[in-house]
Image (cartoon, grey):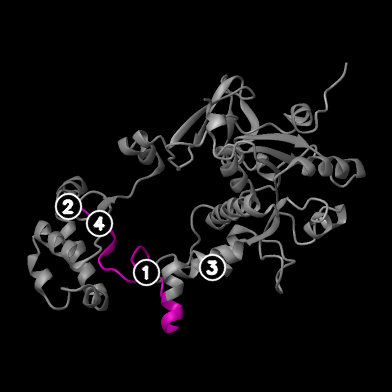
Amino acid sequence: MSAVQKAALAGIKVLDLSRILAGPTAAQVLGDLGADVVKVERPGEGDDTRKWGPPYVLGASGKETKESAYYLSANRNKRSIAIDISSQSGQDLVHQLIAQADVLLENYKVGGLSKYGLAYEQIKSRYPRLIYCSVTGFGQTGPYASRPGYDFLIQGMGGIMSLTGEPQGEPMKVGVGIADVMTGMYATVGILAALRHREKTGEGQHIDVSLLDTQISWLVNAATNYLSDRQLPERLGNGHPNIVPYQVFSTADAPMILAVGNDSQFRRFCEVAGVSHLASDERYATNPMRIRNRVALCELVDEALKKRVRSEWLRELDAVGVPCGPVNNLEEVFADPHVKARGAELSMPCEWADGGEIRLLANPLRMSATPPSYRRPPPRLDEHAAEVLADWLEKRETT
């Protein structure tokens, strides 16, 4: 049995009208799980991220292609067709594709598709089984609904930047578009749940997922800390608001992470570090006391760790079950033997890259019966127009 036949979402058709990162991330996950994803793009331009470089993909000959590495990150396992939805013929074609689709995914501004007759309220009665997922910055309702949403703005408005950065430094965003990515993940979960609901009832539905809602949801313990006592948290750099010591420390040669999660681990750390007296000091013996005396304790821990090189600390602390690790750059990440063993880096043959290969991040899901599959590299703009029309609409080119 082929990987496609064993795929969990084999037979599911997804019409992807989204672009940038959040929507395409959701569509890529669905594609990895076996769905047939058709990416509808603007003629001549396509997804904005195609031009978000450098770096651009290098072909087998070393020549630079027109596709950015950014675009590759969220667009494998899709076929591209260019359609001008501002034209009547384009709208008619999209309707024909919707009639075959199980899922429509879009990230236009609220009301943006209504002028083309493609908003959910305009088509839901015509396609009652359709699962229609709208990804926006602020959601379909509320005073900000009409605003465009960008990851950076959402990280600021959604609170994560107030928690990230050094105590005396400026608020800091996360180094990747995490609000976009997490919104894509929640969109995927919603689509899968809606497919299950349709399986039982035959009913489609509208999914309204926004960057701001999602960003706030993954404030997790920081938000519940605030909701519990209404005290604004301060930025702690690499520290943790509820656990100490749990941050980056210096060693004799390189920084390392010490992630002590309980009192037992703290005692074992103190023994290895030669500071056993700290574990019996009432100021540091329990986690609540360590939190109260965070600054003094972390200075003592930092002083102890600077006496030896990182590799020695990692080896000895790991041997006694104290969580610790290096702060890796990306070269070190992909050279790590465990990362290699888990197959985080993926190579795919790609004809448009001069017949060469492209390097991607693998899907992290490990499924024993229906694993993700990698069937198609990210497509060139309109690469599959004839193929999609033939497969979905049984329209064959004539000569």
Identify the mark nearer the N-term, 3 or 4. Answer: 3
Horizontal side of 398 relative to 26 (left or right) equals: right
User: Alpha-carbon neighbours of circle 3 within 10 Å: few (<14), some, or many (≥20)?
Assistant: some
Mark 2 and mark 4: span between their CA atoms?
15 Å
Residue 173 versus residue 5 in the image, above or below: below
| Residue picked out by circle 2 | 317
Please tell me whether mark 3 or mark 4 is closer to you in this view. Answer: 3
Identify the mark nearer the N-term, 1 or 4. Answer: 1
Task: Give the percent coordinates (x, y) of residue 239.
Answer: 33, 66
Identify the mark nearer the N-term, 2 or 1. Answer: 1
Mark 2 and mark 1: span between their CA atoms?
24 Å
Q: Amino acid at mark 1?
A: Leu
Which residue is drawn at the image coordinates 46% and 73% (left, top)? 223
| Residue picked out by circle 4 | 250
Query: Which quadrant: the C terminus?
Result: top right
Q: Amino acid at mark 4?
A: Ser
Label drawn at residue 38: none
Please tell me whether mark 3 or mark 2 is closer to you in this view. Answer: 3
Q: Is residue 109 visible?
A: yes
Identify which residue, 352 or 348, lies in the foreground.
348
Identify the mark nearer the N-term, 2 or 4. Answer: 4
Q: Quadrant of residue 377?
A: top right
For mark 3, give the secondary structure. helix
| Residue picked out by circle 3 | 216
Mark 3 and mark 4: span between their CA atoms?
32 Å
Q: Residue furthest right?
A: 88
Please tell me whether mark 3 or mark 1 is closer to you in this view. Answer: 3
| Residue picked out by circle 1 | 236
Asked whether residue 364 is drawn in magenta, I would say: no
